[in-house]
Image (cartoon, rainbow, N blue to C red):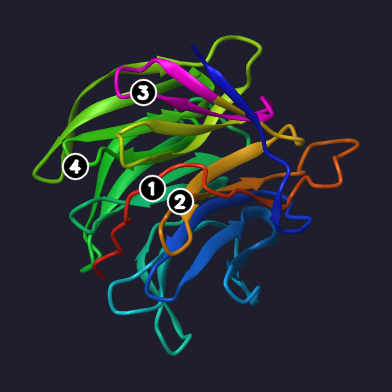
Amino acid sequence: MTTAYDVHEVAVPARAELGEGPTWDPAAGRLIWVDILSSRVHTYDPATGARTVRTTGQHVGAAKPRTGGGLVLNLRDGVGLVDPDGSFRWLHRDPVPGRRGNDAAVAPDGSLWAGTMRYDETPGGGTLTRLTGDGAAETVLDDVTVSNGTGWSPDGRLMYYVDTPTRRIDVFDFTDGRAVNRREFARVEEGAGFPDGLTVDAEGCVWVALWDGGAVRRYTPAGALDRVLTLPVPRPTACAFGGPALTDLYITTARTGLTAPHPLAGSLLVLPGGGQGLPQPAFAG
């Protein structure tokens, strides 16, 4: 039986064009998220309400904490590093005209799995690349359209992945830093929206935001739908657990492409006590 919930609580009222990639930074006690098309990295401290905004020089698909402090950024022209003193340097620069970085995630081994896509969403025009702290890059998938949510099971033995237009969440076996044996985990039916960013909770369940579906879904480890969070906005983009106990579910949203966006479109939403998240590794670089 599927349980439904309505989510209306706002953590950060905003007008992000394309909010994405919520990530809890336990060292700083804050949530990191990005507005891709406005080239901005946001932080939010739920304990104090403090917020910061950093403008990047180009579209930014994701921002994740690093083990020694600072951030790793998935940008239009590659992957860059923000050092603790705020300075920027490239880790892996790979500009391709008409392509940009999109969602990214840090694997249990500390590597970054960074996705790309074409601005015009040309089928097969994107990639998924694994990067390590020394700048070594290995293309894992080279026939992706819109590379999106990536996450790992609690034991690190499974990797979940979304290429949005397929309407699927796929799963791989994950061993020794490699993803193999790709297969379908769950499929979003026609008319329910498109799978976007995802997170995995402590029970091994997969939560996925549904672009143009106005909802976040939770699937059991067996791939069965068991929970639906109904949202007031049509374009949620990603979700992640945050807060000191990792029990609050944060949801980024977008207003791009909407002719009459809802007043909350582009805001950071939250479901307090929504579940139990997993600690996320920082990028080892």
Q: In this orientation, which residue lies closer to the viewer: 140 or 229?
A: 229
**Distance from the alpha carbon under mark 1 to that under mark 2:** 6 Å
Counting from the top left corner in percent of width and height, residue 139 is at: 27, 43
The first of marks 2 and 4 along the sequence is 4
Dot 3: element: loop
Determine the residue positioned at 39% across, 45% down.
Answer: 276
Left or right: where 178 falls relative to 57 = left
**Which image quarter is the C terminus in?**
bottom left
**Distance from the alpha carbon under mark 4 to that under mark 1:** 14 Å
Counting from the top left corner in percent of width and height, residue 275 is at: 45, 42
Q: In this orientation, which residue lies closer to the viewer: 207 or 148?
A: 207
Question: Which residue bears the numbered disc 4?
Answer: 156
Left or right: where 15 falls relative to 194 = right
Contact between labelled residues 2 and 1, with CB atoms less than 8 Å apart: yes
Please identify, in this view, whether the residue under mark 2 or under mark 3 is nearer the observer.
2
Q: Which residues are magenta?
A: 211-227
Q: Is residue 228 magenta?
A: no
Q: Residues within 10 Å of mark 1 (few under 14, many from 20)?
A: many
Counting from the top left corner in percent of width and height, residue 8 is at: 73, 42
The amino acid beneath tag 2 is Thr
The amino acid beneath tag 1 is Gly
Counting from the top left corner in percent of width and height, residue 66 is at: 33, 70
Dot 4: element: loop
Residue at the far left in the pictured view: 176
Label ID, residue 277: 1
